[in-house]
Image (cartoon, grey):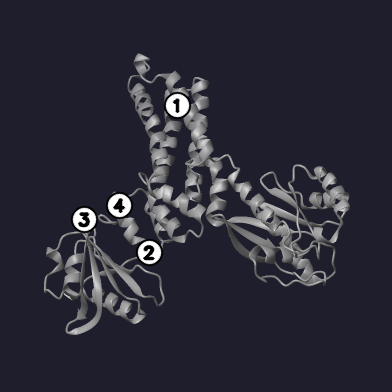
Amino acid sequence: MKEISTICAIATAAGHGAIAVIRLSGDEAITITDKVFRSPSGKKLAGQKPNTIHFGSIADNHEIIDEVLVSLFKAPYSYTGEDVVEISCHGSGYIQQQILQLLIKTGAEMAKPGEFTMRAFFNGKMDLSQAEAVADIISGESKASHDMAINQIRGGFSTEIHILRSKLLDFCSLLELELDFSEEDVEFADRTQLKANLDEIQIHLDKLVKSFSLGNVLKNGVPVAIVGRPNVGKSTLLNSLLQEEKAIVSEIAGTTRDVIEDVINIDGIEFRFIDTAGIRHTTDKIESMGIERTFAKIEQARIILLLVEASQTVEDIKKQIEEISPSPDQLLIVVVNKIDLITDNNLETLLGGSNGFAPCPTLFLSAKRHINTHALNELLLSTVKDSNVQPGDIVVSNARHYEALSKALEATIRADEGLTNGLASDLVAQDIREVLYYLSEITGEIATNEILGNIFSKFCIGK
């Protein structure tokens, strides 16, 4: 087996800043740093206590590169479980590269993407699902995605998986033992208790699998398509929500010929708004392409805002709903715009007719005058917060976890049905082994080099 090298990398983002951090990890991390570090007292880092910070300079022979602070973390009490040194220097790109090159010349190797976290995984500092949460917490752009990643990195999801595994592990062992005594026709595993456990695990797995639809949008943002006929105010609504002139607004029909996207953070949850081309019959080739893209974006959206004018009839609005034909997984909200242009009496009439849009919620506003636009934000927020997921529940946001959980659920259902139908113990045991296998894949107790390589290659260098 190849000897574990000492790795180094710049751990802070590229570009100029007040400070930058260069990280080393490995058996020689402190020794290598000692060769280039100069302390005012002349003391070596190797003799210092762990979890301490030391002022000095980094020098290449007699040439001072920078004054730095060096943080020491000794194995096993570090992020990677190895000796770790973090050098805080000034943020100049030149200084960072000079120090990095000097460390490599002195014996360190350049770290690969995610190699620090991979070492933490191999050294038992975290399981695979927690390691993946590290990448999520770095890339998270909203409170919702941050909270999910924090829960996962603290072991909330891992604990859930370990509980499910432990409930099946003993029974699987007893079923395997029965095979050794098949001639005696004895049963070591209590079938009634096993059936109860399988039913309970099936409920848990089903809940985790279903949570992915919510977790995925919380992680990546909730896609919201703004659709409707030309000149109903789609671009005006987008500008109003963004509070900036993102989209061109004009009285000329068909101004928006391509999709325009931007993100709004509402109470810690990201919504990705998509302003689309107006839906109508046209001979304009470019506009037709925009309309085709509109329908493509409608298919991708979780929420569809059908924007209509307050002057339109209820029958006309119902026709547009039929044209869009949302899927069962999509929420269509009818947004009646330009209410500032009609009388209260007409609005009351339309309000009375809006009951015919059920089950689609209906909201009345004026995008141009910013009347009731706050209510749209509240309604959008409620579509996420009114889900079946309760505070503290585990929400799956990782596609790899979703796939493994789905396969584990299928195997659980097969084992449950086999037990009910009196299937042979060896066949039931095989299905239970599959459940255990897929659950172990999530935490990394079973992981191939291909899976690990794919996961950690998506990390930034230095993490």
Q: For the residue carrying disc 2, how many other residues have a C-alpha within 10 Å: few (<14), some (14-19), or many (20+)?
A: some
Q: State the residue at coordinates (47%, 54%).
A: 146
Nearest to N terminus: mark 3 or mark 1: 3
Query: In the image, which is nearer the foreground, mark 4 or mark 3?
Result: 3
Q: Position of residue 52 (x, y in %)?
A: 21, 62
Marks 4 and 3, Cα distance to the nearest angstrom? 14 Å
**Residue 197 circle label:** 1
Question: Going from the N terminus, do you reach mark 2 or mark 4 first?
Answer: 2
Q: Circle 1: is it few (<14), some (14-19), or many (20+) Cα within 10 Å?
A: some
Q: Name the image quarter holding residue 60.
A: bottom left
Secondary structure, mark 4, is: helix
In which image quadrant can residue 291 be found?
bottom right
Label 4 with label 3: CB-CB less than 8 Å: no
Q: Secondary structure at mark 3?
A: loop
Task: Give the vertical position of 100 relative to 233 (above or below).
Answer: below
Q: Which residue is mark 4?
A: 122
Q: Earlier in the sequence, mark 1 or mark 2?
A: 2
Distance Cα–Cα, label 3 vs label 1: 41 Å
The residue that disc 3 covers is 75
